[in-house]
Amino acid sequence: MSSVAPSPARARKSRALSGTVRAPGDKSISHRSLILGLLAVGETRIEGLLEGEDVLATARGAKALGARVERLGEGSWRVHGVGVGGLREPLETLDFGNAGTGSRLMMGVVGGSPIEATFDGDASLRSRPMRRILDPLEKMGATVVSAAEGGRVPLTIRGPERAIPIVYETPAPSAQIKSAVLLAGLNAPGETVVIEREATRDHTERMLRAFGAEVSVEPHGPHGRLIRLKGEPELKPAAIAVPADPSSAAFPMAAALVVEGSEVTLEGVMINPLRSGLLTTLLEMGADIRLSNQREEGGEEVADLVVRAGALRGVDVPPERAPTMIDEYPILAIIAAFAEGETRMRGLHELRVKESDRLAAVHAGLLACGVEARIEGDDLVVTGEGRVPGGGPAVATHLDHRIAMSFLVMGLGAQNPVGIDDAAMIATSFPDFVELMRGLGAEIEIEIGERA
């Protein structure tokens, strides 16, 4: 596997940011477009695909499993799929780099199919738990031939001739677990059922329907859902227009909120209710954000967001909101540092098993930049004073792209520059982050690493 030399970076207090930009295509939709294109019979066309390293790893995985995958132009791709039962056993290890979503969803695909495949990734992916994905797949008839300690990659999965349909209640709110089970259930006769006590992002359910699968969703308990999938469909190719990723749009949005005098318009941002927890929270904090031109693109609700800087106040973020904004807590913590008063983010246990222990990494970074913060159980509490000192040693990113981008955004509004130890991994989800931010007027300096 290739490696990238560290690229230290620094952001300094910027003048008012202004302009109109479009964030990269949504990463969740991009991964699923390639995977469902693989599982459909015929040609799927994708426009606006995120061409970050994580998604490109999924494209290579789809090709290794038998699909013809072709890039036609910037963000424009064609996938000629082989159907649910037509996967080819890969000749080589499926290397997913840093792609947690791509690897876990593809484990569901392999775990429900009569083939064997080995999964691996970079140092960060090798540290992430996979057992919660493997457990339901084993119930469906898959065999974990070998795995690193704790069920981590590298690991080898052998799928059954026909997967066993199961009723599975997810042990934690996780769209990745749910999606892996549903994808494995495509090759199972009868009905596969997933129960989640707290609703998570529903892109897999929406997109399965768009590709011709029979999927029903009904409420379950106060916050949960029950999803039913009829197995063994013949998926039909679809035309996918990938909306702008709200998790990526969060960074220029946050910068516009904390850099005095800024006004930025973000075009075509997905506002799916199960992905809009950050937007809800920022409005509660008093953020000046206006939604315009609301419409539907590729089966998802989108809108243009007009964001202006202004005074913010601390809020209490309830734990049941976590599934709708789990990737946005690092940047919310940065925004909270610029707000007046205490912001408590509750129920963040899931942050401990992301690309890094994001809870610990964000807390350490805040302290290094002179922000008062503490961890209480699974809660992160940030006390904002309307201004952030910044300065100090470079923040440790732990190979985590969201930590890297979050603290660079902090530097744009802090009194003193904020440095990070490595920006190389930003390319996994937002390859043009620095260019886009500079186009708005951001002052970011970066040393580009070389591939080893």
Image (tube, helix red, strand yellow):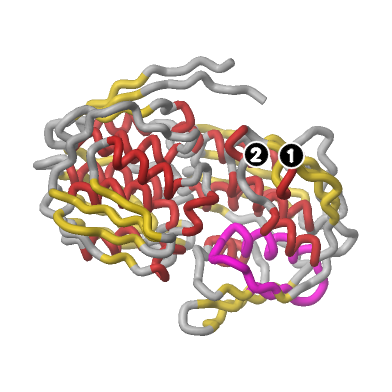
Magenta region = 168-194
Q: Image quarter for residue 142?
A: bottom right
Discs 2, 1 touching: Cβ within 8 Å: yes
In this picture, is 79 found above or below 441?
Answer: below
> What label sits on residue 154 in the rendered view?
1
Residue at the spot 74% in from the left edge and 39% down from the top edge = 154
Mark 2 = which residue?
A: 126
Q: Is residue 171 magenta?
A: yes
Q: Tell which residue pokes out farthest to the right in this image.
A: 161
Q: Residue at x 11, y 51 (%)?
A: 310
Residue at image coords 48%, 62%: 299
Label 2, residues with CA under 10 Å away: few <14, some 14-19, many ≥20: many
Distance, label 2 to label 1, CA atoms, is 7 Å
Q: 139 or 304, which is in the foreground?
A: 139
Of marks 2 and 1, which one's residue comes earlier in the chain?
2
Amino acid type, mark 2:
Arg
Element type at mark 2: helix
Q: Nearer the viewer, residue 378 or 19?
A: 378
Quadrant containing the C terminus is: top right
